[in-house]
Amino acid sequence: MRTLDGKRVIVTGANGTFGRLLCARLELAGARVVGLDLRADTVGATPVIACDLTDGGAVPGAVAQAVDTLGGLDLLINNAGVGGPAPAELPPGDAARRQLEVNLIAAWHTTAAAVPALERSRGRIVFVSSRMALLPLPLAAAYGVSKRALVAYADALRLEVGSHIGVSVVYPSMVASPIHDASAEAGLSLQGVSRYEPAEGVVAAILGAATARKAPRDVATTGRGRVELFLARHLPSLAAAIVRRTITARLAAGDLDQAPLAAGMRRRAGR
């Protein structure tokens, strides 16, 4: 799959930041695209089918409709995702459950429904995870857990279908998008902890994984990202020490003083 021209593609979360860019880039490359999202819409020339991807009863029908519209399927991009604060020391609430449902279970439902069509075409699946899957941050446990679980799912899937379907995982860092709004409103901005990267670079990495001669297993979106993934995988103690030092500095600077969810960390830090 060295070219996207004429390829048949499903993009989940098509109405979101990455989704809209993906649809535009895919169209430009000559692909035929159908989106899946909570709300029906049109992104450029791409029709978006309305479907709650966490609803296991609704997903097979929506995927079948998309495959029928396209006349088959060559590429599934599991892009749909949500974020938000969720301290690991507190019980999981509705927001945490929502992140697990959207970031993991929705991708599982969609992938399972798409596998037969992808097997017939010897196609590809690209999962959009996060660097937090391997390099977790405090106060965002649900997001990190859900994205790490997504990677584990991709690894298991690769063992089952890898002889016929390429499976790749892409690890973006922080991109300016509404996914960070809930954390910022809770006084838990990632400013000073993670660095923004351009959304266009993430999209380029996703499409690069889709068109590589052989499906890459793990794809970082920047040079810094490659270093961070290496540290997280091979030197996890060092990676954790770097995160702890950064968070300690933020606490000392008072950056989390207005965040009620960080009360436990402030208390343990003597603030």
Image: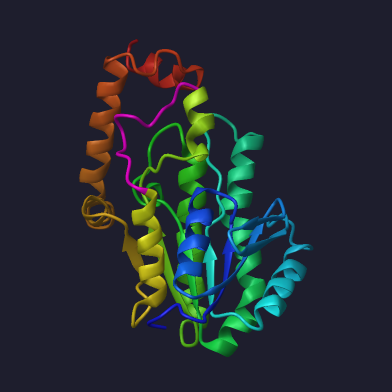
Would residue 189 be counted in the magenta stretch?
yes
Q: Position of residue 175 (x, y in %)?
A: 39, 43
Q: Position of residue 127 (x, y in %)?
A: 48, 63
Asked if residue 36 can be seen in this view, the reply is yes
Residue 166, image quadrant = bottom left
Identify the main secondary structure in magenta: loop
Q: Quadrant of the C terminus?
A: top left
Residue at 39 percent of width and 46 percent of height: 132
The residue shown at (46%, 80%) is 5
Quarter of the N terminus within the rendering: bottom left
> Foreground: 237 or 121?
121
Q: Is residue 128 above or below residue 63?
A: above
x%, y% of residue 117? Answer: 63, 83
Judge by depth and name the residue closer to the eye, 194 or 243.
194
Residue at position x 52%, y 23% from top? 185
* Residue 88 visible within the image: no
Asked if residue 25 lies left or right of residue 74, the reply is left
Above or below: residue 225 compared with residue 159: above
Please state the extent of the stretch shown in magenta in the rendering. 186-198
- Residue at 34 percent across and 18 percent down: it is 255
Q: Where does the image place residue 6, in percent across and percent down from the top left? A: 51, 82
- Is residue 89 one of those drawn in magenta? no
Front-most of 140 and 123? 123
- Residue found at the far top of this picture: 271
